[in-house]
Image (cartoon, rainbow, N blue to C red):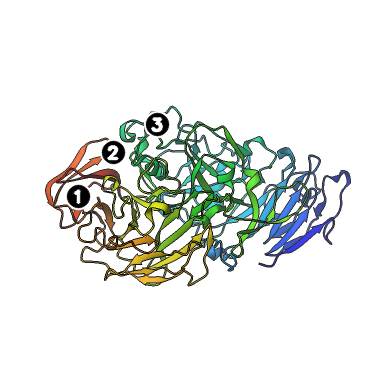
């Protein structure tokens, strides 16, 4: 992307002021237009008066000192102007708000926006109001959001976002803020007096009955920017969930009488512990938001936080039932393998007002990160990584490249296969990842490097592998979004990829090595080996980068593949082809029937089914169910959350939470 740079002391509309407090002065009726792709550098303060206006489609960097100010003033220049309209951060392509960045691609971002960085100016000297245009995908019943405004009264969101919020918990219209230590969303006081105070706070906005429209209308939020000089930008990653007794299977309640199992989700811990509500579940999770009007680049966090296990991003499908709870049906995940970020690395660039979650392996380190250090004016450009203007380096303006693949160990490379399920029009529906390296771990182990289990709303993924290939029957009650195996002991052996989504008509493959995409059509990695998949007739074929293959569902509306790193060993092709070992029983939502159903593993004969409400009361049961047919979970009261427990004739158990709306 072409970038223009203005490093100036004066523009035709700018006046240098005395005492070095204001470098750029925008008088009444003046207009400064910063074009898309342009960086405007201002080495001092900035002030607008009356109708003076800055319209920013590009990037503005203000680097000042403790004598400088950022102000918007009324006519006369003495009284603060707080009704907005003077410093506007524009969306350039508002209709493209749902588009993700494309790291490793030469295609420019299709969603760009004006960004503002203010450095070195104390908070009490930042009194100017900024208008931030905003659109975002709908997250569901609660919108996850950051508010990068200092001392902003929360009731102002009513007019800005086009709906009336309150502080009535369970109403579906309230605003709550996350408490990392207590692992709960906290109530707020009266919104007419409650103000933002801690940068990086993670808020949720009630969006009951689709009452919050951030998609068809460009909203404008107003307020004073946070200073990068304020202490709360530094976040101590310590004691999240420490000492809290979640109870057996999360049945204890928080201070608001909500069961922890009604809202707490931790796919990282399920991977580490081999199941939910183990020692790591719900602990060492830190939820933050972007407190600035620039992007945050999280690609270096695995270097800066030695015990960081993974990053959770882009929540969607939030469902909630009053007095029962809820959660999200899908996320994006990034983990670390041998110093290389794997998974949904496209999403490591956090937009203004965006949110993210960090999962640490343990509570052993007193790690502090300063969110101000991760600010970037960034576009993903080319295969070398992030092309950015650095915001770190005092008053020196540097153009730098930050790779997404840092700290790679010399013992070998990280090979990553992304498997993307597409609908009949070629649109992505679901995806999963397979990662292989000398430091990866085959099969279940608490020492895994990069695995993440699938969320409850998914129907496309892989299963934990046996050391000899195929299903690991001892750890088949969950399946994986990111799967890993060690190339030393698993080359030529198969993992199982299963699709239960009838709308997936084809699969597309993307291959990376050490975080860098292979060229289109290339299959060989640096080892000389390739990834493989088996076809319907049992013949293995090598996988070329960006190749697309059709998906054919069987009579059970399921499609299954074997995926290999390295050509299949003799005797491994067709492992578990005749009998699908492993517990693949799933509780899925049938869109056509608008009901949940149990889809049984093909090696199950009969099953018993028990449905409990969130108080533990049995509300529905069935015995000797024929496992050769799907079982419809019907007749349940709406607006409630239930646990469905399915037990096979051999004692295998699958449990799943469902939400009836």
User: Which residue in the protein does label 2 denote?
Assistant: 614
User: Which residue in the protein does label 3 denote?
Assistant: 254
Q: Position of residue 325 (x, y in %)?
A: 35, 41
User: Which residue in the protein does label 1 denote?
Assistant: 635
Q: Is residue 106 visible?
A: yes
Rounded to the nearest whole Å, what is the CA distance between mark 3 and mark 2?
A: 14 Å
Q: Nearer the viewer, residue 74 or 622?
A: 622
Q: Position of residue 569 (x, y in %)?
A: 33, 61
Q: Secondary structure at mark 1?
A: loop
| Residue at image point 61% right, 42% down | 152
Seen in the picture, residue 480 relative to 257 is either above or below; the reply is below
- Left/right of residue 405 with respect to residue 389 in the rendered view: left
Q: Residues within 10 Å of mark 2 (few under 14, many from 20)?
A: many
Q: Position of residue 233 (x, y in %)?
A: 63, 39
Q: Nearer the viewer, mark 1 or mark 3?
A: 3
- Left/right of residue 359 with respect to residue 461 in the rendered view: right
Q: Secondary structure at mark 3?
A: loop
| Residue at image point 41% right, 42% down | 266
Q: Nearer the viewer, mark 2 or mark 1?
A: 2
Q: Nearer the viewer, residue 11 or 588?
A: 588
Mark closest to the chain's N terminus, 1 or 3: 3
């Amino acid at each position: 992307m072409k970038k223009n740079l203005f490093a100036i002391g004066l523009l035709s509309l700018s006046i240098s002021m005395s005492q070095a407090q204001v470098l750029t002065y925008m008088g009444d009726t003046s207009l400064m237009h910063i074009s898309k792709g342009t960086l405007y550098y201002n080495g001092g303060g900035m002030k607008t008066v009356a109708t003076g206006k800055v319209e920013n489609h590009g990037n503005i960097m203000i680097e000042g000192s403790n004598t400088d100010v950022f102000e918007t003033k009324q006519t006369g220049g003495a009284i603060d102007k707080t009704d907005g309209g003077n410093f506007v951060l524009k969306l350039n392509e508002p209709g493209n708000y749902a588009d993700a960045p494309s790291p490793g691609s030469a295609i420019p971002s299709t969603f760009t926006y004006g960004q503002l960085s203010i450095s070195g100016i104390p908070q009490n000297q930042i009194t100017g109001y900024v208008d931030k245009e905003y659109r975002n995908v709908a997250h569901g019943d609660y919108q996850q959001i950051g508010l990068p405004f200092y001392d902003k009264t929360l009731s102002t969101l009513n007019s800005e976002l086009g709906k009336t919020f309150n502080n009535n918990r369970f109403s579906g219209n309230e605003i709550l803020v996350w408490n990392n230590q207590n692992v709960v969303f906290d109530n707020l006081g009266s919104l007419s007096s409650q103000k933002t105070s801690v940068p990086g706070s993670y808020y949720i906005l009630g969006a009951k009955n689709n009452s919050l429209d951030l998609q068809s209308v460009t909203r404008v939020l107003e307020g004073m920017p946070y200073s990068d000089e304020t202490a709360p930008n530094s976040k101590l990653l310590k004691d999240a969930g420490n000492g809290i007794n979640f109870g057996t299977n999360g049945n204890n309640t928080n201070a608001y009488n909500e069961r922890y199992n009604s809202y707490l989700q931790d796919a990282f811990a399920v991977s580490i512990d081999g199941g939910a509500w183990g020692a790591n579940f719900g602990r060492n999770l830190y939820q933050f938001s972007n407190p600035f009007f620039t992007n945050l680049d999280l690609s270096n966090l695995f270097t800066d936080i030695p015990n960081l296990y993974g990053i959770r991003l882009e929540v969607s499908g939030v469902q909630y039932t009053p007095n029962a709870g809820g959660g999200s049906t899908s996320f994006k995940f990034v983990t670390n393998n041998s110093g290389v970020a794997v998974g949904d690395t496209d999403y490591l660039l956090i937009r203004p007002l965006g949110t993210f979650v960090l999962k640490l392996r343990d509570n052993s380190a007193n790690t502090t990160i300063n969110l101000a250090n991760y600010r970037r004016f960034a576009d993903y450009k080319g295969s070398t990584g992030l092309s950015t203007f650095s915001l770190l380096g005092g008053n020196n303006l540097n153009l730098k490249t930050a790779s997404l693949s840092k700290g790679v160990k010399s013992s070998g490379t990280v090979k990553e296969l992304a498997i993307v399920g597409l609908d009949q029009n070629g649109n992505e529906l679901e995806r999963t990842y397979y990662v292989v390296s000398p430091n990866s771990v085959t099969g279940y182990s608490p020492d895994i490097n990069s695995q993440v289990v699938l969320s409850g709303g998914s129907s496309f993924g892989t299963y934990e592998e046996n050391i000899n290939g195929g299903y690991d029957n001892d750890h088949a009650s969950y399946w994986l979004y990111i799967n890993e195996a060690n190339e030393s002991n698993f080359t030529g052996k198969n993992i199982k990829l299963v699709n239960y989504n009838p709308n997936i008509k084809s699969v597309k493959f993307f291959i990376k090595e050490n975080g860098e995409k292979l060229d289109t059509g290339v299959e060989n990695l640096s080892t000389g080996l390739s990834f493989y998949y088996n076809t319907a007739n049992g013949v293995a074929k090598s996988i070329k980068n960006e190749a697309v293959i059709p998906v054919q569902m069987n009579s059970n509306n399921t499609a299954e593949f074997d995926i290999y790193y390295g050509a299949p060993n003799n005797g491994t092709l067709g492992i578990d082809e005749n009998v699908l070992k492993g517990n693949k029983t799933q509780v899925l939502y049938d869109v056509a029937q608008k009901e949940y159903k149990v889809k049984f593993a093909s090696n199950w004969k009969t099953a018993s089914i028990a449905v409990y409400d969130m108080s533990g009361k049995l509300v529905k049961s069935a015995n000797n169910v024929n496992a050769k047919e799907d079982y419809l979970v019907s007749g349940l009261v709406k607006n409630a959350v239930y646990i469905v427990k399915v037990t096979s004739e051999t004692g295998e158990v699958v449990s799943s939470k469902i939400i009836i709306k």
